[in-house]
Image (cartoon, helix red, strand yellow):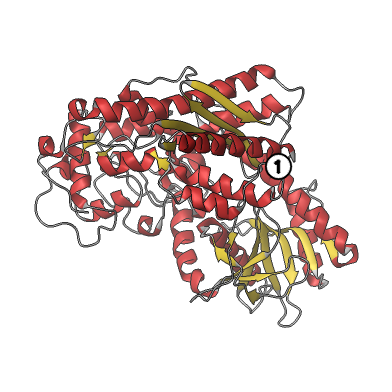
Amino acid sequence: MSGGGTILHSVDSDIGDRDGRKRNGTAVDRPADAPTAFIDARALIGCRHRLHLDATHPEPPAGLSEDPGVRQRREAATAHRARVRDALVAADPDAWVVIDPRCRAAERAEATMRACAAGAHHIWGGLLPQEPDTGRRGGSEILLRDIERGGYIPIIVVNHKVTDPRQPEPADFHPTTSDPYHWNPQPDPHRKLRQQPRDVQRLAHLHRMLQRHGLASPALVGGVIGYQFDRILVHDLGPLLADYDLRYADRIAVVRGELPTVPSKVPECRQCPWWTRGLEGPSCEGWLIEHRDVSLVAPGSRAEVLRRHGVETIDDLAAWVGDDPEDWQHGPFDEAVVTARAWIAGAPLVRRVEQVRVRRADVEVDVDLESFQEYGAYLWGTLLDGVYRPFVTWDPLPTDDEGRSFGEFWTWLMTVRAEAATAGKTFAAYCYSRTAEDKWLYESARRFAGRPGVPTVDQVRAFVDGPQWVDMFQAVSDQFICPNGKGLKKIAPVAGFAWRDPEAGGEASMSWYRLAVGYDGTPDLSQRTRLLEYNEDDVRATQVLRDWMTTRADGEVAGLADFGRRTIAT
């Protein structure tokens, strides 16, 4: 039920008949004297029901505190934008007009329009006038004067990655980028694009607002400066405007009470305060359980496809007969049916295979890292022969000391592997969902190249692409259907493991880390202990899960045949 900037759920199918299904909600006419409703581009990507609830209850419920992860990301984004502003303005102070953020919104909008009318080349912190008729509001970190065509190009500054480096290679598509200090858009063979729908929707939103005042560049482009602040990613806005217009019309109607909404589970519900808290009725989670809504087992866009075929509840899905839906693009459809049947039966897992197998070795090391946003990986935790060994820096990230701890971790891991080979023993290292580990192995090798113990990128690639790096998440995904999710904290308890800290989790660890290193005051040593125990529990959970899969899972987990299937096509 959450909105905000980490949405993973596509809203293409939300528009139009998303809430035209069976429901108690009905559209309402907007009273003539209703207050003007405004939304900015953040509302375009996210949960429609969250948008409705936030609009209906603008004041947060009593006793409800802001999610610490959301607060930390906002604070980090503010600091990142300040760094970018200071660097750009310092490089050419006479070329910039900086709008004072301490002024009231109306004053900032007036100052922005005056700067545009004067033909300022660069405007930082521009706020465009609110539009009572359309409901639009918004501003751009940078408004760049289009010298050749006239008008302004919106450039936003975000605290996430928008491209990744790559070796130059021929490709059908190269993203367009520009030097951040000198506007010169060119296809960039050294970058590959990271899809960020929230960014392009915001740029389209700003283009429409500039267009209203005759200030939009005819080039129909916008730019994004990401976390790395090395290039401006340039987006062609022309093909995006029709989708933006549909989204905007839908979302402003939701805010104005002209379109009804009901809950539906999407990945970001776990960070939404409405998920477990209701005001005039049950929480979103409670509503979905009460209605046995199909999104509980088929979240996000999966549920939208099913609803188009009349599948509203988990029971509807479990009773499916006939051919698979032609528009189903989410893996084997039989798996979705089995997931529904398992949920009804209360089965946390369903075994896909006759015999569960996991790659085992004579010498086994479990690995789990802890990172802080995009600043770095401060802790590499390991488990060998029941002994937990952390490789950590408590210098606040970003810090060069991260290179030391990473080099020590890699040296230790490779020494264990080499000693196993010398003794004629097999070796394997295990993680759970290798995406994060792989990312920071590569990132650390690039950032700290040449430092003691730090491998080359080629050495990292040879290891992670080899058979000795085992992803337990993949082993679970290949051999089990998981009605309640595949996260380690969902799966390991089935194997009998429990975390010591009831609040253990990635979002909570961000708050603990800030306290542990003293970002906001004196370092809290108790939080360092808490982080180490959390990391140790993660690696021990992986080891317990592996042992369980090897010895007990076959007898403790029902197979496909128990749910009316012998096999599932792949």
Residue at 43% from the left image edge and 49% from the top image edge:
466
In the displayed structure image, the side of residue 279 where residue 408 appears, left or right: right
Residue at 24% from the left image edge and 36% from the top image edge:
356
Residue at 59% from the left image edge and 53% from the top image edge:
457
Q: Is residue 222 above or below residue 433?
A: below
Q: Position of residue 107 (x, y in %)?
A: 78, 53
Amino acid at circle 1:
Pro
Toward which corner of the image does residue 264 lie, by quadrant?
A: top left
Specify few, some or many for label 1: CA neighbours under 10 Å numbering under 14, 14-19, or 20 or more.
few
Q: Is residue 114 visible?
A: yes
Q: Position of residue 23 (x, y in %)?
A: 27, 43
In the displayed structure image, the side of residue 142 where residue 546 appears, left or right: left
Toward which corner of the image does residue 292 lie, by quadrant?
A: top left
Q: Residue furthest right?
A: 94
Q: Nearer the viewer, residue 285 or 88?
A: 88
Q: Is residue 40 visible?
A: no
Look at the numbered disc 1 and give the secondary structure of its residue.
loop
Q: Position of residue 244 (x, y in %)?
A: 49, 64
Residue at mark 1? 452
Q: Residue furthest bottom?
A: 148
In the displayed structure image, the side of residue 122 where residue 340 appears, left or right: left
